[in-house]
Amino acid sequence: MSYRGRFAPTPSGPLHFGSLVTALASWLDARYHRGEWRVRMDDLDPPREQPGAADTILRQLEAFGLHWDGALLYQSKRGDAYQAALDALMERGQAFYCTLSRQQLKALGNVHPGPSVAQPPGPDRAVRLTVPVAALCFDDRLQGRVCAQLADEEGPFVIRRRDGLFSYQLACALDDRDQGITDVVRGADLLTSTLRQIRVLDCLGATAPRYAHLPVILQPDGRGKISKSVGGAALNPDLKGPLTHAALTCLGLSPPAGLQQAPVTDLLQWARENWTPALLPRGTELPAPALLQGGQV
């Protein structure tokens, strides 16, 4: 199968600098491999969404020259597909209903005891996916071999919440399968999610994509990653050149200083001509670039 990547933002707010770094890396990797780059809106959790954020994100991507291939996909329109997958997992005995509360799980050391506490179908029940006793592992293009024993860390994890909303782990894994995604480039803060998504795909008999988890960009004061809730100012369209230039430096490239004031299309063309995955930084964190450190954005 030819390369097909994707960028899947959550519309809980506009894109910030950390989002730009991830989107740019994913887009460049797809173009380098002469593949497709899809955009999917992870609008699965209405309480977290910000009205109008999805449209804002799409306008931001276009303003920064990151044009996608194919049709947009919205998770909010995929409920039937998620339910069908959940039903299949239940029929195979790989998922079960659970009524344990957070307080009860805390008393158990936050490790779920497994199907032994399974409940019959009914209201106010989560659905959890079973996990193997053995460690789950995958080889990341940037982070190397990543392993975890989910049975010891959390136990069976939620794939549908008590309120009826499908979990990110189920939806993301199923979307990647159904869209034919071959490569996922995203932040290292999602490494633990990746293992759970691989478990979902394993249970559904599907092959997981290849993964490359980028270091997350820290806030200027170094206190945690830039996020929509902390330190993540919306991308300023008047600073497309400087912001894209700074994002490329975070990805291991050294674009000429003069390109900061050039049209963003020129900067992206330079990036495509000079991009190679071997330059991507390893590790899980990167300091904020000088542009953010100086408070210019």
Image (spheres, helix red, strand yellow):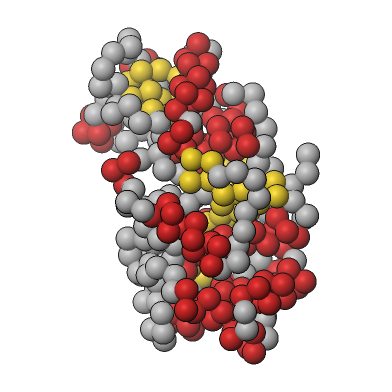
In percent of width and height, residue 10 lies at: 43, 50
In percent of width and height, residue 263 lies at: 62, 79
Furthest residue in direction left, as rendered: 103
In percent of width and height, residue 132 lies at: 53, 26
In percent of width and height, residue 7 lies at: 56, 52
Q: Residue 168, located in which quarter of the rendered image? A: top left
Q: Is residue 218 visible?
A: no
166 sits to left or right of 196: left
In the image, what residue occupies the spot 43% across and 36% down? 76
Q: Where does the C terminus fall, quadrant-wise? A: bottom left
In the image, what residue occupies the spot 69% across and 46% down? 4
1 sits to left or right of 159: right
| Residue situated in front as seen by the camera: 61 or 195 | 61
Q: Where does the N terminus fall, quadrant-wise? A: top right
Q: Is residue 209 above or below residue 170?
A: below
227 sits to left or right of 268: left
Q: Residue 104, located in which quarter of the rendered image? A: top left
Q: In this view, does 147 lie above or below 30?
A: above
| Residue situated in front as seen by the camera: 81 or 232 | 81
Q: Residue 121, located in which quarter of the rendered image? A: top left
